[in-house]
Image (tube, helix red, strand yellow):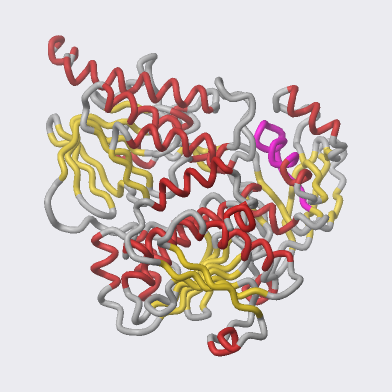
């Protein structure tokens, strides 16, 4: 049977799943509803049959579109996957490709163990819910942020099975939702048919949105309770923060890594990394997973937990997060940088409706030859353009200069793939009502205006530092807002260090990793031998 259904899974993947399924507790029934002669249905049936052959804890039943069970359960979209439908209301609509397959595997694990990724504070608030909620999370195969949002919704359905339905929907196979909710970016959340918005939310905020049926952006004050004491608080879960966690743990320091969104930072959405030592070519998401697993051996990693306040009290730093309070002897700020905006008309109102800052996340919507532009001239912009071209989008590059800043290798790939470039050109306006319809471009040499019909605008014009923590501590910043550091990553305050993109300079993974290592080593040295006290 494994040969019949398991060919879709490489042997290496099978072994990983066998090892993971050893942690399954209760038996899981997966019902798969398919349509004859439909490729996504065939793939889904084969995948789930193959998975079921790897453990006796998973049973799979296949039903076709005309079956009585299909009609009885009201299934109208194919393929649809139900997981332990006698106990939970958790479903997956569409073929679980790419990142979606990871979501499905994790959902099976959570259902079998009656588990959840919700924090105690989020669970407490969720249990106060009195009315039913139907949560829909719209995802795509290439979105690395989608699994976290989807699993938060699934966790809510497991914790509150009497009131919460969680439905994970593959966008590309269910395009009618795109028009219904004007979705052109994922993850996108809808609760009780009310669009809540895009992006990943920490569990506490997500649960509040379940209650309020509206988008909530603010962070919450920490829950009163025991204060956690650590040697080193590392704020940020990108390459620099993860590396700092490894080096801190190996030095014997008790450390915690806070990441308010998703572990990985900008690397997470980089399609292919070709300049990181040890890998001639590796997907950004894969590289992040490797770093994450290693860092877990040395530091506690708290995903979805953001620092909302920090202050120094004598020799201790008091950090308040959206979950609790921490006391730390030292702090490493590795908060990175976020995408710089164009600041033109239409950019804000059409964000998530064709305006995007993540080609990996949202490029899938434009794969069928749809016209898009990428704005920028650096490595990220050219990489995004190449990625969009590779998946079938009709892409052009818009750059304000007459030469690109990207590496020569990337420039050659751009030329080899015959991707058009609008030189000496800027975007003056993004037009459209419910979604992007076009752009007004201005040539900087002759000031001429060109109107270009496009359905997507991907912005990659650089970054601005996430320096809120630095401002709370009144650290010295440079003219662009980056944290000033010395050669050992020390900031202007004793026992506070900074690493990675938030310090400016060369924004490369290798640079961030090196700075994270130096920051952690310096922190250990300073904790062991506070040189400034001797001077005083």
Residue 29: x and y in percent read 45, 70
Please report the residue visible at 70 percent of the width from the left and 27 percent of the height from the top.
406
Q: Nearer the viewer, residue 520 or 157?
A: 157
For residue 399, side relative to residue 255 (left or right):
right
Task: Determine if the magenta segment contains residue 375.
Answer: yes
Residue 291 location (% of width, % of height): 44, 33
535 relative to 340 in the view: left or right: left
Kindly give the residue lying farthest to the front in the view shown. 1
Residues 285 and 261: in front is: 285
Question: Residue at the spot x=54%, y=40% of the render?
Answer: 12
* Quarter containing the C terminus: top left
Task: Decide whether residue 201 is among the magenta residues.
Answer: no
**Outermost residue toward the top in this view:** 535
Task: Decide if residue 63 is on the left or right side of residue 404.
Answer: left
Do we see residue 361 in this rendering?
no
- Work out whether 332 lies above or below 89: above
- Residue at the spot x=69%, y=41% of the render? 384
| Res 270 visible | yes
Q: Which residues are magenta?
A: 372-386
Counting from the top left corner in percent of width and height, residue 476 is at: 36, 28
Nearer to the camera, 323 or 36: 36
Quadrant that contains the N terminus? bottom right
How many numbered dots are placed on residues in this image? 0
* In this view, 401 is above or below 57: above
Residue 3 spot, x, y in % from top left = 62, 53
* Vertical comparison of 191 with 276: above or below: below
Question: Left or right: where does residue 280 sit relative to residue 260?
Answer: right
The image quarter containing residue 348 is: bottom right
């Amino acid at each position: 049977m494994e040969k019949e259904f398991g060919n879709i899974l490489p042997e290496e993947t099978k072994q990983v799943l066998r090892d993971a399924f050893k942690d399954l507790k209760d038996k899981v029934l997966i019902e798969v509803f398919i349509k004859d002669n439909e490729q996504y249905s065939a793939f889904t049936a084969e995948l789930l049959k193959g998975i079921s052959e790897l453990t006796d804890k998973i049973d799979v039943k296949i039903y076709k579109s005309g079956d009585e069970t299909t009609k009885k359960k009201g299934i109208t979209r194919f393929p649809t996957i139900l997981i332990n439908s006698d106990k939970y209301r958790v479903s997956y609509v569409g073929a679980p490709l790419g990142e979606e397959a990871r979501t499905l595997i994790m959902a099976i694990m959570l259902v079998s163990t009656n588990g959840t990724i919700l924090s105690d504070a989020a669970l407490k608030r969720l249990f106060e819910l009195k009315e039913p909620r139907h949560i829909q999370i719209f995802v795509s195969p290439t979105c690395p942020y989608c699994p976290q949002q989807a699993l938060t919704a699934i966790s809510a359905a497991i914790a509150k099975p009497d009131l919460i339905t969680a439905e994970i929907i593959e966008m590309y196979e269910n395009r009618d939702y795109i028009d219904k909710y004007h979705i052109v970016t994922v993850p996108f959340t809808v609760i009780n048919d009310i669009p809540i918005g895009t992006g990943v939310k920490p569990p506490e905020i997500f649960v509040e949105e379940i209650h309020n049926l509206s988008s909530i952006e603010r962070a919450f004050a920490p829950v009163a309770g025991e204060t956690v004491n650590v040697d080193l608080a590392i704020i940020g879960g990108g390459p620099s923060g993860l590396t700092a966690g490894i080096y801190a743990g190996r030095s014997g320091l008790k450390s915690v890594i806070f990441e308010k969104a998703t572990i990985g930072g900008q690397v997470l959405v980089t399609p292919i990394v070709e300049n990181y030592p040890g890998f001639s070519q590796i997907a950004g998401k894969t590289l992040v997973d490797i770093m994450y697993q290693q860092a877990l051996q040395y530091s506690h990693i708290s995903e979805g937990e953001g620092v909302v306040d920090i202050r120094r009290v004598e020799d201790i730093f008091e950090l308040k997060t959206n979950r609790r309070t921490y006391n730390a002897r030292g702090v490493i700020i590795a908060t990175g940088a976020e995408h710089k905006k164009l600041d033109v008309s239409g950019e804000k109102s059409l964000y998530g409706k064709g305006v995007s800052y993540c080609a990996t996340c949202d490029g899938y919507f434009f794969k069928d030859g749809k016209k898009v532009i990428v704005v920028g001239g650096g490595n990220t912009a050219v990489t995004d353009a190449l990625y969009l071209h590779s998946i079938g989008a009709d892409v052009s590059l818009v750059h304000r200069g007459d030469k690109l800043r990207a590496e020569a290798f990337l420039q050659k790939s751009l030329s080899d793939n015959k991707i058009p470039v609008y030189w000496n050109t800027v975007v003056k306006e993004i037009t459209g009502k419910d979604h992007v319809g076009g752009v007004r471009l201005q040539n900087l040499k002759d000031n001429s205006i060109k109107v270009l019909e496009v359905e997507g605008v991907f912005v990659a014009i650089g970054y601005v530092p996430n320096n809120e923590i630095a401002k709370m501590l009144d650290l010295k910043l440079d003219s662009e807002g980056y944290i000033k550091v010395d050669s050992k990553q020390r900031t202007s305050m004793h026992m506070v260090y900074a690493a990675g993109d938030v310090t400016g300079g060369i924004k490369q993974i290798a640079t961030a990793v090196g700075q994270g290592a130096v920051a952690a080593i310096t922190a250990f040295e300073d904790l062991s031998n506070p040189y400034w006290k001797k001077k005083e």
